[in-house]
Every structure is written in C-alpha cells, then in structure tokens.
Amino acid sequence: MDSLITAAALALSAGDALGALQRVALRDDPPALALRGIAMAQLGELARAKELLRKAARGFGPREAVARARCVVAEAEIALASRDLVRSPATLREARATLEAHGDRINAAHARQLEVRWLLLTGHVDEAARALEAIAPPGLPPAMGAVHELLAADIAMRRLRAKDLRAALERARTAATRARIPSLLAETEKAFRILDQPVARLFTRRGPRVASFAEVEAVLASKALVIDAWRHAVRQGRTVVELARRPVLFGIARALAEAWPDDVAREDLLSRVFGAKRPNESHRVRLRVEMGRLRRLLAELAEVRATARGFGLSPQQPTREVVVLARDTDGDDTVVLALLSDGESWSTSSLALALGTSQRTVQRALGTLAAAGKVQSLGSARARRWTASPLAGIAGFTPPLLLPVRLPID
Amino acid sequence: MKRQTAEIVREYGPFEGSPKVHGVTFDGERVWFAAGDKVTAFDPQTGREERSIGVPGSAGTAFDGRHLYQIAEDRIHKIDPKTGNVLSSIPAPGGGGDSGLAWAEGTLWVGEYRARKIHRVDPETGKVLRTITSDRFVTGVTWVDHDLWHGTWEGDESDIRRIDPETGEVLERLDMPQGTGVSGLESNGADMFYAGGGAAGKVRAIKRRRQNG
C-alpha cells in the first residue's frame, strides 16, 4: 500500500472522512477510488459513493480479486442502505465466495449479512434464516455480532416468535454493549420496544382486540384454529394450510372465521369476497365452486357447513376456539408505510420487490398515503424516492446497516 | 533467474497499538518500522518493543547510519532518531504513491507502488536522478552487498526479488507463501531480511543466502 492511501485510510478509520478525501481527492487509481467511495458513503453521499466503488472494482487487476470483491461488498452495502433492492444479489454472492476462498473470513461474513438483509427486505424469510445460520458468530467483531443478532431478531419477528425475538435482542444488547457503538446500542433498545407494542389484531368470539408479540405467539401455540392473515394461512398447531396463492379462498375463510360461531349470509360473502354489489347467478355458482375447494383444503381442520342463509365454520373439535390473526392495520398502504418507517428513501420498484406486489399497487398505495400527508417524495421519474413523512407517527424496526469500516484496500 | 521459496525464520509482532506495518529499517541494533502515526523500534534478539517516536509513518523507512528517513503522506522526512525531531523534508517522487525507501551510497531509493517503479533520489533536494521499472507493484526497497532488492505485493501474491539496478531485469526471486505480503523491506547487512507484513501487523525475518560469486 502506498503512502497517501495509508494516511487516508488512517484518517478514515479515525472518523475523519474529509481528511481522507483531502489526501486522495485527485487520484483515480483503484485504491484511491475505493477510499473516496467509503468516505463519501460515511458523509451520506450514497449515489456518488456507489459510483466510485464500482469504478474502483473495475480498476483492480486480475491479481487483486480480494480488493475487487471488497469493493463489490461495500457497494452492495450502500445499495441496501439506499434501498436499491433491484440489483440481484448474485454479484454479492460471487464476491463472498472470492473472499471465502482467500481466507478473508470477516469480510465474507459481512457479505453474507448483507445477503440476509436483502433476503429479509424482499420477504424471503426462510432463505434469510438459512443464510444467517451459515455465519458462525463466535470470532466476529462485536459490532458484527450485534448486527448478526439483530438480523436473527428480525427473522424471529417476521416469524412471530416472541421468545426467539427476545433472546436474540438480549444477545444483540450484549454484543452492542461490547462494541461500544452508541448508534448500535440505541438501535437495539429501540428494537426491544417492539416486544411491548401492539403488533396485531385478534378477532375472537369476544370481538376484535390488539395484541402484542407474546400474545400472538401464545395464540399460535394454543389449540385454537387460527386464520392467519399475516401470512395467509389457516393453521392449528403444526398443521398449516397455505392460502397465500388463493386469495379468494383465504378471503372466504377469514370472513367465516370472523363471524364464528355464527354463520355468514351468502350475499355478504359475495359482496365481501367478489366485491359483487348486485350478485347474479354466476357469482353464486362461483361461490359454490370455491366453497367446495375450501372445504376440501380445510377438511382436516374444520368443516365448512352450509346453513339456511349461507355458510359457517366449525372446527373439527367443537371445543376449539377460532381466531383471526391480522396485522395491526390492513391494506397495501399500511404495509408500504411500515416499510418506509425505516426512515430510508425507497424507490417504487424496491417497494414492489419488498412486498412481492406490482409497482402499480405500490403506486396506488403511495398515492393514498401522499394525499393523507403520510409520505413524501423526492426527485422525479425513475429517480423518484419515497420516505415516510415525519408526521406519519409510526414505529419502525430496522437493524442498522453499519456502513463499511473495513476498507476494501488492505 | 534463480527462484526459491522464501524461508521465514522468525516472526515478530503483532505489536500492541500498531495494527499495521508499513516501512521497515535496521540501524545495526534495532529494527524500526512505520506504524501509521508513529515509528517504533524493537530488538530483533528479544522481539521486545524498545521505543517509539511520534512521527507520522505511512510508508517506507530508511537509515543512513545517523538519521532515519520516513515517508509520510507525500513527503520524505529526515528524522533524528534520538529526539524524534524532523530535521528536513523533501517531496516524495511518487507524490504520495510512494511505498518503500532505502539508503545507499549517498542517495535515497524510493519505490512507487502501483506505478511499479523505483526512483533514485537526491536526499537534499528530492530531485529524481534515475528511474527503474519493475513488472510488479513495488513495496519495500533495500540494498545489500551492492545488490538492489525489492518487495512486490499484488493481491495475494508477494515476493522479494533482486533486480539489475541498471536494467530492472529480475535476477533472483524469493516467493512468499500465499497470502503473506511484504510491505517494508530491509536487510540486516548479513544473512537476513526484515519484511513488514502490512495489515498482518508483523515483521518477518527471512533467510538470505549469500551469493557464491
């Protein structure tokens, strides 16, 4: 490593990004570009930082595969921080493999944490959990250990596992305390608050109420028949009927469950599930067909019975409760708002990717939210980014992305 | 060209408070190395750190028998090793892209890392007297027995090589084990090289076989 690169790296690791930039501002060799990229990232200039790191990666020679891989990882981290999810993580995986092959364990683990983050942001919870398991936390620096546990907490949260969530947060707090990074500790403490907040609505025989994580977990562990609007499934203990790709069937199941132990009139079902204002014969035929399908799918868990005025749900064992578990609030706009609550600026395409829905749906939701003053946008056309307005008043939970402190040049 | 595997005889460090080793030199008793914000000396017999002087050291280090020369950012400082005072300063020939530094026969030899060059420089004025080109990134530079040696380090590959000071032709190579880099380089005037290990924070003693003629 040459003299000014060393001096600039020293300045950067002491938190003096401007001092680092001053030393290499006029240089365009790859290590200088990489340093400038990291310095710009630390100054919050994410777009410029990404550009510089990409140029740096391209400039490194064939013998400098590790330096190039580190640039790719740093660039991916910045892309995640700016919620640019559209780029495929394949290049990140490739870079990770290079780092592993060259024995750069720490940067390889860091790359994998970013993969987990990408998977979580795009809703691939099981894959994220598997990727996280491939990282061995012992031997990680404390700050990375804390991020590891926050990722585990995020997974537990998405799987509605209160006990795992609490345990992961306790470990995150220990690691963050050891790392002595105030922002990381603050993030951990903020995450703890989610344990006591209402996160869901439960519809029971006694009417709807809000519930915390622990209560949600208790319901899922109980013998109740749960219509899970969180993940669009009907479950009882370990038996799960996935209806994520059958929205009509799930809609019927949910309507029946909310009415339980009463039945639902045929007309109410038609208007609720098909949006039919003036139901005709073809609606009725379709409902009969869908009912038949639902009956077969739920056979093990509940009986879908025809009543004089419509349909009703009866658990196979009459003593069982029927509970609907829903998000605290429903609707596309709420979910979009929840994503924006991480305080970052998102593009429409990244939001769509994260929600597994179309850009059109996201745009519609954003339109509603913008009209209500809950979100605001910056830029126009493809560069347009959305953020939650400070008045939206929602609590977020986002494990922090610590912008790289390990320099790509070493 | 003779080619061998470098024989690492001993490793020193990592040293407390010095995560990285940049330049390395030898004053006849102690090995000095540049550790970023200071220059540190240790006894190669015991491996114990003996003293540190608070001058910036971001690349090569050399010793002329009385003074230390130290590359800091884009300057080469002449330093009194007893007091740590900077006595004078000249611009570094690579403008900050400089890496290794050696003293020989009244002139300074400076490696320019990514430019793959070695410059011979007037120690009073900083004027470049001559430039040799290498085919690898140049790290440490040293003279021993009238031979010019330099370290190379590109990515995972690193070696210590003797080159013809006139033509730059590679005459002899000691290959470092994969992933073991050479930042600074100095000979002890006898049968040993001291090689800085960069981010590994180590100084390695490497056997040098005498020429047979």
Image (cartoon, helix red, strand yellow):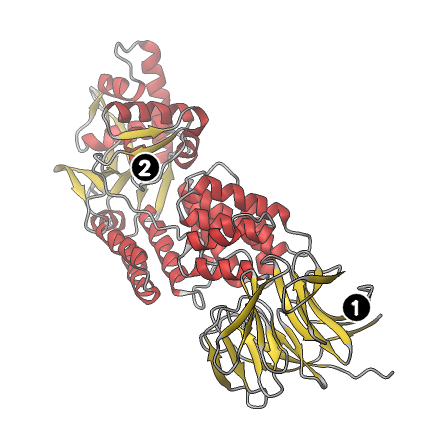
Residue nearer the viewer, A101 or A183: A183
Where residue B211 appears, x then y in whole percent? 82, 82
Q: Amino acid at mark 1?
A: Pro
- Give the quadrant of the N terminus of chain B: bottom right
The answer to whether mark 2 and mark 1 are in CB contact below 8 A is no
Q: Which mark is residue B165?
A: 1
How many residues crowd mark 1 within 10 Å: few (<14), some (14–19), many (20+)? some
Picture layout, residue B80 above or below residue B90: below
Q: Amino acid at mark 2?
A: Leu
Mark 2 = which residue?
Answer: A340
Chain letter belonging to callout 1: B
Q: Quadrant of residue A297?
A: top left
Query: How many angstroms separate mark 2 from mark 1 (CA)?
Result: 63 Å
- Marks 2 and 1 belong to one chain: no
Q: Quadrant of residue A124?
A: top left
Which residue shows up at 45% across the image and 59% down it?
A: A11
Task: Give the residue furthest to the left.
Answer: A206
Which residue shows up at 43% across the image and 24% down it?
A: A381
Q: Is residue A361 visible?
A: yes
Q: Nearer the viewer, mark 2 or mark 1?
A: 1
Q: Quadrant of residue B209?
A: bottom right
Picture layout, residue A342 above or below residue B138: above
Which residue shows up at 56% across the image and 60% down it?
A: B74
Q: Is residue A94 left or right of residue A119?
A: right
Q: Is residue A89 visible?
A: no
Element under disc 2 = helix
Element under disc 1 = loop
